[in-house]
Structure formats: structure tokens, C-alpha cells
Image: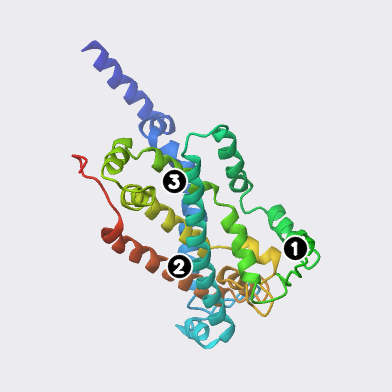
């Protein structure tokens, strides 16, 4: 009782002191305040303002902003360059994501075996992902695949004349995609963790029933790790549609716009021609496309993703 009275007195004193009382009552809120300010300033405000600017003719160096309705969006549909950029982005995403996931799953499956030095191999295979989408790696990739680069020099040893990887529109997008496929470490680690969680007694039961290794992989492994496949699919799909560094540094969108992705077009319109309104409209269209693909992915998961219930069935 005495203690409660002391607490009430203490609260009354703090209340009179104003700010200190506020600090005491809102300690939890203050902990998240830096994140909240960052979210409002760097996420929510740009998100809302870009939607507004997408309906205007906003120029980066003009103060007057006029509301022009859906003109920017109709311009996107009428401009061949923008339509091609969307086509290239789809081709890039649907080429990179399946290759990257298949390669990551293949390497994870091999590294799941108990072989000598497996920890060293896991580290080596993860290094490309640590390097990430850095500028240095993109520059290195450019030197590897240029006309007199290391790749063509290796091919020349076998009397094979290498193509102009970066100057030919038939190969340029493939070279850019290959860089992202090479950085397969992150999905590989997630696949590896999922493979280790598959119960070994299921493989033993399948072996007793005469199932081959391929049948075990298709009928046991794939269904049980399908939630992880779904997760990697969605995250990698979102990353692919936001790709910028690799095509910008390696090919600068060329040749003939064969590697110009939507993100590059947003950059060009915003900071080269200063058409912020058009750039905002393209960004929002890209956002709607990614959101639609994500929703379709979530809707499709009931047909191919296996979730065990609480009873483990």
C-alpha cells in the first residue's frame, strides 16, 4: 500500500515535469520512433507523392506542376521504347528467376550430401551472393564478356570464335541474366536448410517401396520443400523486376535497347530528361505488374505448395 502511494506520488511529480512524464509513459513508442520517422519520410511520403506526380507533368527543374490526368499512362502505351522496355523486363525476369532457382536447388541438393569438405564448398558457393550486386562485380563481368575478354580467349584455345556477347542483341540480355544466376547463394542457403528438414524416414520408406533417387526427389523432396520454393520464387521475382545495376553498368541498356529494363527507363526519364511525372507513372505501372504477379503466385500456391497441418499430415 505504501509502495502504491509512492508510485502515485512519483507519477504526479513526473506529470508536473511534463516532458519527463511523457518519456516515462511512452518509452516503447520512443524506441520505434527512429524507424517510424524513416518510414514516413523515406517510404510513405515518396510512395504517395509519386502517385500524385504520375498524374502531372512535373519537371524536376520547373516549379509549376499541372494535373494532366492519365496522359502519362497513355504515353507509356503509345511509346514503342517504353513498351519494349517492359517486354525486355519480362524476358529478363522469366529467364533469370527459373534458371537461378533451378541452379540454387541443384547445388543445395549436392551440398546436402555428407561429403568431405562440404563446409568449405558451402562457403565458396555463397561468396558470389556476399559480393551482391556491387558495381565492381558488374565491371568485372563486363571485362569478362567483352570482345577480347577472358571468355572469348578461353574459347579461342579450342578454336572457337566467341560471339560479340555485349554488342549483339541476341546475347546481351543472356549475359546480364547470367550474372544474377551466378549470384545464387541466398536461395541456395534457404534450399539447403529446407532439404535438411526433410525427415530421413520418408526416404527410407520410399527406398523400401523401390522408388529410385529421381522418384524420391520428385515425390518426396519437392513437395516437402515447396513452401521454400514458393518463398524463393516470390522474392526472386520481385528482385528481378527491380534490377538496375547490372544492365546499366555492363551494357548501358544496349545494344538497340535489348537490355533496357524498366528501372533504367525510370532513371532516364527522371534524371536525364527530368520528366518526373512520366517516370512516376512508369514506376507505378511496374509496381502494379509486380503486385499482380505476386497475387497470382499466392493464388496458385494451393495447387502446388504443400503445407503440413498441426498434426503433421
Circle 3 residue: 191
Residue 202 percent across, percent down from the top left: 29, 40
The answer to whether the residues at label 2 and label 3 have Cβ atoms under 8 Å apart is no
Horizontal arrangement in the rendering, residue 90 relative to residue 213 (left or right): right
Q: Residue at x 57, y 68 (%)?
A: 263
Is 19 above or below relative to 130?
above
Marks counted in the figure total 3
In front here: 55 or 101? 101
Q: Quadrant of the N terminus?
A: top left
Query: Going by the picture, which residue comes out furthest to the left?
Result: 311
Q: Nearer the viewer, mark 2 or mark 3?
A: 3
The answer to whether the residues at label 1 and label 3 have Cβ atoms under 8 Å apart is no
Horizontal arrangement in the rendering, residue 195 relative to residue 95 (left or right): left
Circle 1 residue: 155
Circle 2 residue: 287
Is 253 above or below relative to 302?
below
Query: Going by the picture, which residue comes out furthest to the top?
Result: 2
Q: Quadrant of the C terminus?
A: top left
Residue 166 percent across, percent down from the top left: 71, 70
The answer to whether the residues at label 2 and label 1 have Cβ atoms under 8 Å apart is no
Q: Is residue 45 visible?
A: no
Is 204 above or below relative to 213?
above
Label 2 vs label 1: CA separation?
41 Å
Amino acid at each position: 500500500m505504501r509502495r502504491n502511494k509512492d508510485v502515485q506520488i512519483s507519477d504526479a511529480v513526473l506529470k508536473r515535469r511534463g516532458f519527463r512524464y511523457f518519456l516515462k509513459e511512452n518509452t516503447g513508442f520512443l524506441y520505434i520512433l527512429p524507424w517510424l520517422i524513416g518510414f514516413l519520410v523515406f517510404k510513405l511520403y515518396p510512395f504517395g507523392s509519386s502517385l500524385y506526380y504520375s498524374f502531372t507533368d512535373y519537371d524536376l527543374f520547373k516549379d509549376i506542376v499541372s494535373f494532366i490526368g492519365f496522359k502519362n499512362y497513355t504515353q507509356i502505351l503509345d511509346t514503342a521504347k517504353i513498351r519494349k522496355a517492359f517486354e525486355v523486363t519480362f524476358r529478363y525476369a522469366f529467364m533469370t528467376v527459373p534458371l537461378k532457382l533451378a541452379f540454387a536447388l541443384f547445388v543445395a541438393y549436392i551440398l546436402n550430401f555428407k561429403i568431405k569438405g562440404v563446409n568449405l564448398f558451402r562457403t565458396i558457393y555463397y561468396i558470389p551472393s556476399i559480393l551482391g550486386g556491387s558495381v565492381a562485380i558488374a565491371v568485372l563481368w563486363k571485362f569478362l564478356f567483352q570482345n577480347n575478354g577472358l571468355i572469348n580467349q578461353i574459347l579461342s584455345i579450342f578454336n572457337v570464335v566467341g560471339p560479340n556477347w555485349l554488342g549483339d542483341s541476341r546475347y546481351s540480355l543472356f549475359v546480364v541474366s547470367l550474372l544474377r544466376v551466378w549470384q545464387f547463394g541466398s536461395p541456395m542457403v534457404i534450399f539447403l536448410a529446407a532439404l535438411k528438414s526433410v525427415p530421413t524416414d520418408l526416404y527410407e520408406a520410399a527406398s523400401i517401396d523401390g522408388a529410385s533417387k529421381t522418384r524420391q526427389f520428385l515425390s518426396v523432396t519437392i513437395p516437402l520443400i515447396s513452401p521454400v520454393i514458393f518463398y524463393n520464387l516470390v522474392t526472386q521475382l520481385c528482385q528481378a523486376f527491380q534490377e538496375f545495376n547490372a544492365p546499366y553498368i555492363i551494357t548501358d541498356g544496349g545494344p538497340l535497347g535489348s537490355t533496357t529494363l524498366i528501372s533504367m527507363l525510370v532513371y532516364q526519364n527522371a534524371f536525364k530528361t527530368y520528366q518526373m511525372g512520366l517516370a512516376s507513372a512508369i514506376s507505378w505501372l511496374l509496381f502494379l505488374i509486380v503486385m499482380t504477379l505476386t497475387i497470382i503466385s499466392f493464388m496458385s500456391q494451393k495447387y502446388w505448395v504443400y503445407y503440413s497441418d498441426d498434426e503433421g499430415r
